[in-house]
Image (cartoon, helix red, strand yellow):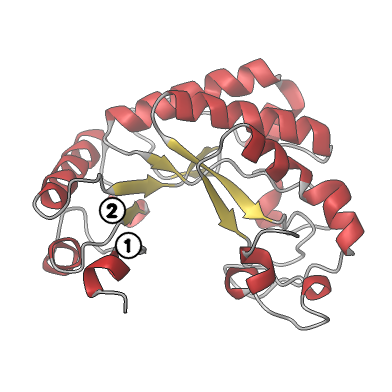
Amino acid sequence: MVKDQEFGELLMVGFDGVRINDELRRYILRWKVGGVILFGRNILGSDQVAELCENLKGLRREVADTPLLIAIDQEGGTVARLREGVTAFPGNLALGCAGSSDDAYYQGMVIGRELREHGINMNLAPVLDLYSDRGSKSLELRALGRDPKKVSEMGAALIRGMQEEGVIATAKHFPGKGSARVDSHEELPVIKETLEELKRRDIIPFQYAIAAGVKAIMTSHAAYPVLEEGAVIPGTISRKVLSPGI
């Protein structure tokens, strides 16, 4: 039987406010949650974030020897929760169109270093979904491009750069949702590609990410009926998506 504290280690929680509240304190001290995610609602500025992260780590040290994961979405461009005290990078599409793998590596290093200096040790990036003309507008500027090989190489370079600075990178959104026609934050996208198409294109960047040593992978919220014998099941609760061997 899994104990409450052991279960808590598997959770990453969000919270309201710009400082530790009673609910979050209870999650860390009683439930021993393994991670905290910072959203825009938790951020006022650079110094405030650094102080918040230090206080979070202090609470964690009261109950565990292992570090607390403190995560943020810092992709660059339209998705960058931390805006003050960090370098402003354009979105992935600009990087993919105008940059090289070396550029991606150095960008990853800068992002990793700046997050680490604020006390953040996990970045929910990079996006490895392939750009598609049919895809949702919510994703297009966040994609590195449409070519699987180039996206794979640049994504792997971003990952190496971040992780060499001591920040966990997260490849997302496995097994790829570039062709999703709707925003998965608002409704359920259904990816209609065949398994062969997924393997030939969408999954390749994630294979490169794994080879590059990525420490985390975020699953897609989209549904992949081809993996579920036609059933429409979100990837985040799909045994096929969450298990090795696609």
Label 1 to label 2, Cα distance in Å? 9 Å
Q: Nearer the viewer, residue 71 or 141?
A: 71
Res 133 visible: no
Most extreme residue toward the bottom is 231
Residue 109 left/right relative to 226 = left
Residue 244 image offset from top left, x and y in percent: 66, 59
Q: Which residue corresponds to the image point at 83% horizontal and 56% vertical from the top-left?
A: 198
Total numbered badges shown on the rendered structure: 2
Above-or-below relation of 124 to 198 = above
Q: Say what amino acid the circle numbered 2 marks.
A: Asn
Q: Say what amino acid the circle numbered 1 marks.
A: Gly
Residue 10 left/right relative to 126 = left
Above-or-below relation of 8 to 133 = below
Above-or-below relation of 24 to 77 = below
Q: Which residue corresponds to the image point at 8% horizontal and 51% vertical from the top-left?
A: 62
Task: Kindly identify which residue carries mark 1.
Answer: 14
Res 96 visible: yes
Quarter of the rendering occupied by the C terminus: bottom right
Q: Nearer the viewer, residue 58 or 182?
A: 58
Residue 161 left/right relative to 148 = left
Q: Which residue corresponds to the image point at 63% horizontal and 40% vertical from the top-left?
A: 210
Task: Kindly identify which residue carries mark 2.
Answer: 42
Q: Could you tell which of marks 1 and 2 lies nearer the N-terminus? A: 1
The answer to whether the residue labelled 1 contacts the one labelled 2, judged by CB atoms less than 8 Å apart, is yes
Quarter of the rendering occupied by the N terminus: bottom left
Secondary element at image label 2: helix
Residue 160 image offset from top left, x and y in percent: 55, 26
